[in-house]
Amino acid sequence: MNGRLKRIVLDALYPNDCACPLCMEEAVLGSDGLCDGCRAALRCCPNPVCAEPLDGLTAAFLYTDPARSAVLRLKYGNATHLADFFAAHIPIPERWTIDCMVPVPLHWLRALRRGYNQSEMIAQALSERCAGLPVRTDLLRRIRSTPSQTNLDAAARKKNMRGAFTADPRVKGLSILLVDDVVTTHATLTACAAQLKKAGAARVYAACACAAGDPRI
């Protein structure tokens, strides 16, 4: 079952007007589609720390529950309908001039096992919101399969990302918005941005569903 079909099935099982997309509990929902409990617990992330060579970083929420558990369900639990929720809440600064969105790629083996790339799904949902801004999956590739970053510290994450990505020369002169699910130590985003700029990208911004509250670079 592909990602879009999964979203259709989940929408049928959990209609937007009666089930909270985060806790999946049936409840009286507000105009934002959330239950009172999840709305009160969510913490927005207005000024995430940005690290070079990124030219800017934006994120919807701090990486705390219920956003954290929702991201994990999106990433590992086939809850692909949550891509729409996060995309709807990621603020894109008006001063950013963007030519295209580039989701952080998965290695093909991991993509095959998972069946979808959650970052690409967020990017596609953002594209629908941003007047069809193109999503390019052909400009950045993950060429090395890397261990999970989950249990690694900042130094180990940075080392883990060395040589993991390569960018296509067609990025030359483009202003790119990288899209990912979570930013913690910036290791993945900065590795991607470095390759994109090495290939000639003019600017590289990043947009994430969540950001760690105190990311260490």
Image (cartoon, rainbow, N blue to C red):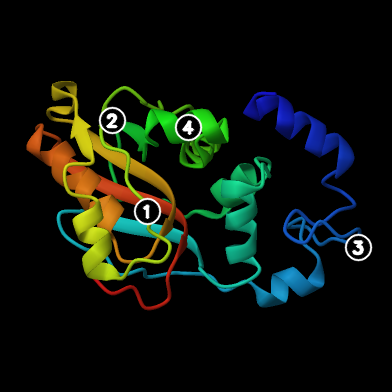
**Apparent side of residue 66 relative to residue 161 in the rendered image (left or right):** right
Q: Nearer the viewer, mark 4 or mark 1?
A: 4
Q: Which percent across, then down, holds residue 183? A: 38, 60
Residue that numbered label 1 is attached to: 93
Residue at the image position 28 percent from the left and 51 percent from the top: 189
Mark 2 / mark 1, whichever is N-terminal:
1
Visible residue check, residue 88:
no
Q: For mark 3, does the 10 Å Cα neighbourhood hold few (<14), some (14 to 19), or many (20 or more) residues? A: few
Give the residue type at disc 1. Pro
* C-alpha gap between disc 4 and disc 1: 30 Å
Classed neighbour count for the residue bearing mark 1: other residues with Cα under 10 Å, few (<14), some (14–19), many (≥20): few
From the image, tell me which residue sits under label 3. 28
For the residues carrying marks 4 and 2, which lies nearer the camera in this image?
A: 4
Q: Is residue 188 visible?
A: yes
Q: State the image coordinates of residue 144 (x, y, percent, origin top left).
A: 26, 37
| Residue at x 72%, y 25% (from the top left corner) | 5
Considering the numbered disc 4 on the image, is that residue within a helix, a strand or a loop? helix
Mark 4 = which residue? 111
Question: What is the count of numbered marks?
Answer: 4
The first of marks 4 and 2 along the sequence is 4
Q: Amino acid at mark 4?
A: Ala
**Dot 1: element:** loop
Give the foreground label among 3 and 4: 4
Q: Counting residues from the N terminus, which is met first, the one under dot 4 or under dot 1?
A: 1
Q: Are marks 4 and 2 in contact (CB under 8 Å)?
A: no
Locate the N terminus by quadrant. top right
- Gap between marks 2 and 1, in whole Å? 26 Å
- Whole-angstrom CA distance, mark 4 to mark 2, is 12 Å
